[in-house]
Image (spheres, grey):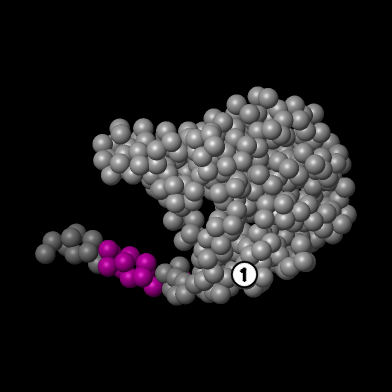
Amino acid sequence: MPKNLTLAITLLALLLNAAVSSPAAAQKPESRAEAVKIVADMRRLVMPGAIERTEAVRIGGIDQWISVRGVDRRNPVLLMIHGGPGYVSMPTSWYFQRGWEDFFTVVQWDQRGAGKTYAANDPAVVAPTMKRARMVADAEEMVQWLRREFGKERIFVLGHSWGSSLGIELASKHPEWLHAYIGMGQATNGPEGERRGLRFALDAARRDNNAKAVQELESLGPYAAPGRPIVLKDLYLQRKWLGYYGGAVHGRKDFSHEGAAARLAPEYTDADLRTMWEGNEFSQDHLLAEVISTDFSVHKRFDCPIVIFNGRYDYNVSSSVTAEWFETVKAPHKKLVWFEHSGHEMFNEEPGKMLEALLRHVRPIAEKAGDVAP
């Protein structure tokens, strides 16, 4: 064998052996617990005055779980009201939220019937209370609790999808509590959005020559037609193909990557994870049909600033319907921000753009009010 070739093989073997025995390889997580420990340590806030809390708060007569994270409690409070109903954002906040925490005290809240709050309460006791009016009242109580706890006259509320249907009512009823309301995947005219979502999915299926999808979608008939209630089995069929063609998460066929990421949530125990999807289904069974059948575009006048983050490819909650509604909104200040590479999950799909939008369009409102850390 030529001397040069022998030397090359020897060097390659040494490199491979070094790679296998390197510290990085040796530290490969062997379990969920080890992986979660790595994530938790990586995002640990070590600054003086930082806050990291995961706790139950008594809201609406039951224990409801929150996480509170930020580098300085003097920064403005930002409450994120998750979507679904029941699709909690706390378990993936380790991925998208860390940058926010340098500029806001960020609160993730597992609502009644969802996530850790579902796991902490008897579903049979909670079920009769799973009404939209109670959920709005819970949101009001949560904002009041945060204002007291952090000594804030106003906070930011960021509502996503289903959560935006609660947030828009908070902004309408209690503008004096808010620096601003931020809507993502903003719920407006639910039935019209559903009709446009079906049209998107059906057009995509026809272009794809997907006979099965076309047949299933056409079987829905006059879906979301005026005077015709939307039933969940029809909604799930519409969403099946809408998601498959990227109308929920742009460029992907579903939310499975988010479900996998939730397994790395430091706030969630193994028991919480086992019941997370059960809580999602529980919440949807009680609340989803009503929210998608409701026209929230009647809310047009606000006495606080309104900022809307809109995914260009969002057909899950139609961004085109939202944009049309936004044109009619009257507020002291309003801003519509387009996320050009996102569907319904812009905080996960474009986390850098999300942070930039919060800093450009949201935090200056608190700065003007003097509600930021010096």
Tell me where residue 218 appears, x and y as whole percent.
35, 38
Question: Disc 1 marks which residue?
Answer: 123
Is 160 left, or right, of 176 in this rendering?
A: left
Question: Amino acid type of disc 1?
Answer: Pro
Q: Who's the residue at 55% across and 49% down the image? A: 289
Instruction: Choose between 186 and 259: the one closer to the eye.
Output: 186
Identify whether 80 is placed above or below 66: above
Instruction: Residue 174: say if magenta.
Output: no
Disc 1 secondary structure class: helix
Q: Give the range drawn in magenta.
A: 11-23
Q: Who's the residue at 56% across and 62% down the image? A: 282
Q: Who's the residue at 28% across and 44% down the image? A: 212
Instruction: Choose between 307 and 214: the one closer to the eye.
Output: 214
Name the main secondary structure of what is drawn in magenta: helix
Instruction: Choose between 295 and 311: the one closer to the eye.
Output: 295
Instruction: Choose between 280 and 50: the one closer to the eye.
Output: 280
